[in-house]
Image: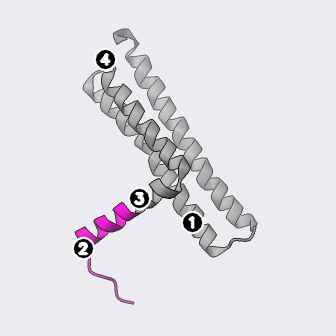
Amino acid sequence: MSKPKYSFIKNTKYALSGLKDMILTEKSFRIELVLFLILNFIVFVLPFKFNYKIILSLSLLIPLFSEIINSAIERVVDLYTTEYHELAKRAKDIGAFLVLLSFVITIIIWIIIISINLDNL
């Protein structure tokens, strides 16, 4: 099987198609996207140094990345089988744990940055 030629335009279209699909079909992703937008607005009104604002803003991407990976895992599992299978359940549970862990990491980053900047509040 020959590999198709790389095309920046085609690959960008595929990526945007994936984003559209995530927005249309994944409620968790939509919720996380809204939180991302709201918290990013809050980040840039906080009286923190610019580098701290960037760290807080970038940390908000971690749950979005995790949700995308989790959705991809779920879809591959669902493609393989629609019946209950212990390995399918374990794969989906691990994907869900990834999302939970990403939130914990993001919260820890926020706590650290906010505690560093408490004097400025």
Cα gap from disc 3 to disc 2, whole angstroms: 20 Å
Mark 2 in CB contact with mark 4 (< 8 angstroms): no
Which residue, given by chain and number where applicable, does mark 4 sit on? 47
- The tag earlier along the polypeptide, 1 or 4, is 4
Residue located beneath label 3 in the image: 20
* Magenta stretch holds residue 56: no
Figure check: 51 above or below 120:
below
Crowding near pointer 3: few (<14 within 10 Å), some, many (20+)? few
Q: Which amino acid does the dot numbered 2 rest on?
A: Ser
Of labels 3 and 2, earlier in sequence is 2
**Which residue matches tag 1?**
75
Query: Label 2, on which residue?
Result: 7
Q: How far apart are marks 1 and 3 (CA)?
A: 15 Å
Where does the image place residue 113, in percent across and percent down from the top left?
40, 24
Amino acid type assigned to the residue bearing label 3 in the image: Lys
Distance CA(mark 1)–CA(mark 4): 42 Å
Magenta span of residues:
1-17
Q: Is residue 10 rendered magenta in the image?
A: yes
Residue 54: x, y in percent?
A: 31, 33
Q: Residues within 10 Å of mark 1 (few under 14, many from 20)?
A: few
- Crowd band around label 4 with a 10 angstrom C-alpha radius: few (<14), some (14–19), many (20+): few
Identity, as a three-letter code, of the amino acid under mark 1: Arg
**Can you give x and y, in whole percent of width and height, for residue 109 in the image?**
45, 31
